[in-house]
């Protein structure tokens, strides 16, 4: 009657062990630390270590440990104050050669990492940092693209010697081409369609989705919704890429910034550890551009060493420290003349990058390539980051310009506004397309939401949240132990396991913990109590009805199960909808609540029953139950 | 009398809750009307999550002079600034409504950046400097969206509950459960309108969890009602009465423990969780009372009156019965 299959015991044991293992990393506190990453041309070496030690000593900061890794150095510090002091000192001492950023370093031992165990992700309200939501002005991106279509249509008609009276934009974002009297409308449409839509082999080129209609002497080029969506989507993706590059450049990768798309026209930027909003905003507002330049032949390294640089050339450094390169001073095309760049395939089906320029630049490119097939060409990537430094107590604003050349590619044939860069690996192609696009923001962005949490408040929130959860747990435990005695103890074990399971599941899936998340955890305890109370009350009822103890336990569990399922289902519904419509911290609340409800059904129904059976299942002469 | 088992509620109570049904429903209606009135005439004190604007949380070295800070802000042109203490005595919360002349979002954001710095400068005094613990700026558009999302969540949850309960029970139960739950949420919300406490996103989440909790309580009672309707041969009112009495102990114990856990949240969770904890504490108390006094009486009134037929096994259950030996 009161039986429990062995495999369920095994399952419970397994779940207990796994939960403990995956919840464990959360017990290790994170060290406030300062991360140093090298800019191009500088190394993480013993010399840097010496400079860091000296700088810290000068500032009177005692570090806990300094770990040097392959591409970064981590200075662990005992407190948040020391972290701030060390950050300031190192920034001044290392200057522009290294990127110095605040971070929180894990102290989780390696062996836990082997199982993939890691602590929960902390939301900004627990970690401190800035949270921005930016609105992308899609209209600008759309205008840009439509302008380029207008321009293209005019050039195509001129080239084909088809006379037109007007090429205009319509209110619904279409383009109307009005031809002069007596021109062949069908021929003109064909010419436009061939030139605008069917460029190259790649079907993903812009313009592929255009539709054409003729009426009288007019040709209406329509932009279907799919095309508009694509333009909007590309604009936001481009902005995301740009932001990611910039943030990675300035903060390093250690601080785990979050830069995500939200809906159709928003970008969320979360920078943990960053406190200075003004600085973060400047970082986001930085501009970058690129220039296509011809490579000047000759050995660049020799030229630099001897100082004999050809008069038409300028020395640039190649990206990733691959040495210098000589490039022509004349710019073939610049970033604002580039319409698009994306990954496609070449004639052999290999990865390539398709670049589209506007007509003016296309003509220039055509003229140049006509005369220079087989020569090399390169792209220079220029970034302007506004910086502010304090000189004599005054803010001095300046712009830091960083220029670097991408690896040169050979001009395989004559091309104009559309061309392909081939001979790339897939990842290289993606990288190049991204860099090209990252040249500038596709559309301007406005800040629509901004939240800054100081690091000390973050730490306070963690302490408060933990304290609240611990006390709510203690309150519940105390009540159960007194009220239900032995079964209260069983309930307590089930509750404890439930708590560990929630933490483990959240850590395992990388869910974000927030301050409301702690509230969700406390509430989970409150709600999972319900299932246990239902069971215990049922058992009492059965006992009162004169049912023998073991049968009471069995029927109590059986009868309560249906009710538990129903009542939890509704709470689950509320949690799921809250997650679907909620944002940020609220989602943290919903996540903990939903996970808590799911695990509480398991712990209350299966685990507590297992324990009860273990204790009372084997006793033959059981007269009463301590419940 | 034996000490164990302990009882918060004596065994086998037989309180005639149904006799009180008109009184309890009248009280519930009056409470709901008061809450509605408070919401309609006084309105919520919406936080910047919904209205947009700027909030700066400041920490001082020593407890600051709130009026002094307010007057200094006023003198500098921040007439609409609300200054209140927050958590411990040395923390202040300064709320600024978005300026009408903000124009574009970019300008508004730039302004918010300036205001945060301004506020720190103005609030600090010689020897009692303020530091920014947290500052938030929400654009008016975002605020509107957050509010709309909150509304959608509420509607979806209500619809989801209705469908689920109608499926698992019977439509009369679904309607009664939803009415009871909405009544609880309404009173909770009314409390916030009446007291003028700031209504922010966490309170909205609190209200939604109150819905979950309240419906949970009601469902446990209804579950018992269903069971008893099938097994007892007595009048519907008597069935309802017995069901409430049988689940009374469970209802009160669960609510008591849940209240304790939320109380811990209120006591130790700090200022940002205070509102949420309050909404849940009120919700738990009201939810418990209404599941005892309101939910079942609703099932005896007018078109909502349940009969044995409503809960007798339906066609497919009959088939299942027929198949039994």
Image (cartoon, rainbow, N blue to C red):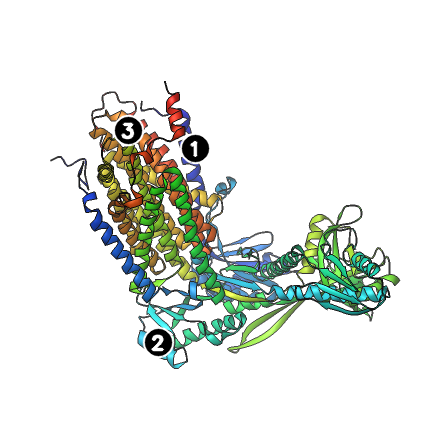
Tag on residue A14?
Answer: 1
The tag earlier along the polypeptide, 3 or 1, is: 1
Q: Which residue is mark 3?
A: A553
Q: Secondary structure at mark 2?
A: helix
Tag on residue A128?
Answer: none
Alpha carbon of mark 3 to alpha carbon of mark 1: how far?
Answer: 24 Å
Would you say B35 lies left or right of A323 here? Answer: left
Q: Residue furthest top?
A: B325
Would you say B117 lies left or right of A323 here? Answer: left
- The number of discs equals 3
Badge 2: residue crowd in 10 Å (few <14, some 14–19, many ≥20): many
Of circles 1 and 2, which is in front? 2
Q: Residue furthest right?
A: A371
Of circles 2 and 3, which is in front? 3
Q: Position of residue A486 (x, y in %)?
A: 25, 34
Q: Position of residue A199 (x, y in %)?
A: 78, 55
Alpha carbon of mark 2 to alpha carbon of mark 3: how far?
Answer: 64 Å
Whether A413 is drawn above or below B125: the answer is above
Q: Position of residue B285 (x, y in %)?
A: 26, 51
Q: Which residue is mark 2?
A: B69
Whether residue A497 is visible, yes or no, is no
Q: Chain of mark 2?
A: B
Q: Tell whether label 1 touches label 3 (CB within 8 Å).
A: no
Q: Residue at x 75, y 58 (%)?
A: A213
């Amino acid at each position: 009657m009161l039986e429990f299959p062995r495999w369920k015991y095994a399952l419970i044991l397994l779940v207990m062990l796994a939960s403990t293992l995956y919840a464990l990393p959360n017990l290790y506190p994170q060290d406030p630390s300062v991360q140093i990453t090298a800019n191009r041309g500088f190394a993480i070496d013993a010399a840097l270590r010496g400079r860091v030690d000296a700088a810290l000593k000068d500032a009177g900061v005692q570090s806990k440990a300094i770990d040097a890794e392959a591409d970064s150095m981590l200075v662990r510090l005992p407190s948040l104050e020391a972290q701030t002091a060390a950050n300031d000192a190192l920034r001044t001492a290392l200057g522009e050669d290294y990127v110095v950023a605040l971070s929180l370093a894990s102290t989780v031992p390696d062996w836990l990492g082997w199982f993939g165990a890691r602590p929960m992700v902390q939301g900004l309200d627990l970690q401190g940092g800035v949270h921005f939501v930016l609105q992308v002005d899609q209209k600008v991106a759309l205008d840009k693209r439509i302008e380029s279509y207008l321009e293209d249509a005019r050039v195509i008609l001129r080239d084909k010697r088809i006379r037109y009276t007007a090429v205009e934009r319509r209110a619904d974002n279409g383009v109307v081409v009005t031809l002069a009297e007596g021109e062949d409308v069908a021929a003109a449409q064909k010419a436009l369609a061939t030139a605008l839509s069917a460029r190259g082999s790649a079907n993903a080129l812009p313009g592929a989705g255009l539709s054409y209609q003729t009426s009288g002497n007019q040709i209406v080029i329509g932009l279907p919704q799919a095309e508009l969506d694509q333009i909007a989507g590309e604009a936001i993706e481009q902005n995301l890429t740009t932001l990611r590059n910039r943030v990675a450049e300035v903060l390093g990768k250690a601080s785990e910034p979050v830069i995500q798309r939200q809906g159709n026209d928003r970008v969320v930027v979360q920078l943990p550890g960053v406190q200075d909003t003004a600085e973060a905003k400047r970082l986001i507002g930085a501009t970058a551009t690129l220039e296509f330049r011809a490579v000047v032949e000759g050995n660049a390294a020799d030229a630099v060493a001897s100082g004999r640089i050809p008069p038409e050339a300028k020395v640039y450094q190649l990206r990733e420290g691959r040495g210098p390169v000589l490039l022509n001073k004349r710019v073939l095309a610049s970033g604002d003349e580039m319409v698009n760049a994306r990954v496609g395939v070449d004639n052999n089906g290999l990865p390539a990058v398709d670049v589209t320029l506007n007509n003016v630049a296309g003509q220039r490119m055509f003229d140049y390539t006509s005369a220079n097939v087989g020569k090399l060409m390169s792209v220079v990537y220029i970034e302007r980051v506004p910086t502010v430094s304090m000189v004599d107590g005054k803010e001095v604003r300046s712009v830091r310009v960083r220029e670097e050349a991408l690896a040169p590619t050979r001009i395989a044939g004559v091309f104009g506004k559309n061309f392909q860069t081939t001979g790339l690996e897939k990842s290289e192609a993606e990288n190049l397309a991204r860099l090209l696009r990252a040249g500038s923001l596709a559309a301007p962005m406005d800040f629509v939401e901004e939240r800054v949490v100081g690091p000390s408040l973050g730490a306070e929130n963690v302490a408060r949240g933990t304290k609240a959860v611990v006390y709510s747990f203690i309150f519940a435990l105390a009540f159960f132990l007194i009220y239900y005695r032995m079964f209260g103890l069983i309930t307590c074990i089930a509750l404890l396991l439930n708590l560990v399971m929630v933490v483990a599941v959240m850590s395992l899936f990388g869910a974000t913990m927030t301050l409301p998340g702690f509230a969700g955890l406390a509430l989970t305890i409150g709600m999972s109590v319900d299932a246990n109370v239902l069971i215990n009350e049922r058992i009492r009822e059965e006992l009162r009805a004169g049912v023998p103890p073991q049968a009471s336990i069995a029927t109590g569990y059986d009868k309560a199960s249906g009710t538990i399922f129903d009542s939890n289902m509704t709470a689950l519904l509320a949690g799921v909808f809250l997650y679907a419509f909620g944002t940020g911290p609220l989602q943290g609340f919903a996540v903990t609540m939903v996970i808590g409800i799911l695990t509480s059904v398991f712990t209350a129904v299966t685990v507590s029953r297992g324990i009860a059976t273990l204790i009372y299942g084997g006793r033959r002469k059981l007269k009463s139950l301590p419940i | 009398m034996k000490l164990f088992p302990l009882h918060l509620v004596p065994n086998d109570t037989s309180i005639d809750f149904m006799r009180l049904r008109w009184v309890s429903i009248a009280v519930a209606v009056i409470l709901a009307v008061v809450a509605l009135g408070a919401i309609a005439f006084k309105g919520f004190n919406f936080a910047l999550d919904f209205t947009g604007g700027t909030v700066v949380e400041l920490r001082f070295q020593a407890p600051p002079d709130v009026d002094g800070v307010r007057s200094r802000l006023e003198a500098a042109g921040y007439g609409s600034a609300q200054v209140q203490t927050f958590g411990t005595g040395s923390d202040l919360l300064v709320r600024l409504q978005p300026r009408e002349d903000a124009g574009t979002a970019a300008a508004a954001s730039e302004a918010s950046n300036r205001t945060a710095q301004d506020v720190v400068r103005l609030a600090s005094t010689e020897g009692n400097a303020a530091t920014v613990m947290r500052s938030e700026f929400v654009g008016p558009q975002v605020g509107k969206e957050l509010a709309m999302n909150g509304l959608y969540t509420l509607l979806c949850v209500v619809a989801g509950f209705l469908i689920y309960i109608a499926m698992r029970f019977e439509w009369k139960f679904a309607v009664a459960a939803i009415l009871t739950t909405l009544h609880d949420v309404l009173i909770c919300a009314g409390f916030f309108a009446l007291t003028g406490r700031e209504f922010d996103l966490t309170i909205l989440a609190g209200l939604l969890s109150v819905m979950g909790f309240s419906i949970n309580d009601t469902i446990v009672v209804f579950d018992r009602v269903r069971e008893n309707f099938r097994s007892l041969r007595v009048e519907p009112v008597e069935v309802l009465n017995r069901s409430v009495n049988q689940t009374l102990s469970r209802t009160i114990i669960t609510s008591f423990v849940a209240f304790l856990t939320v109380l811990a949240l209120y006591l130790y969770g700090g200022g940002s969780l205070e509102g949420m904890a309050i909404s849940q504490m009120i919700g738990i108390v009201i939810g418990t009372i209404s599941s005892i006094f309101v939910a079942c009486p609703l099932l005896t009134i007018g078109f909502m009156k349940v009969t044995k037929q409503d809960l007798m096994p339906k066609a497919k259950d009959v088939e299942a019965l027929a198949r039994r030996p």
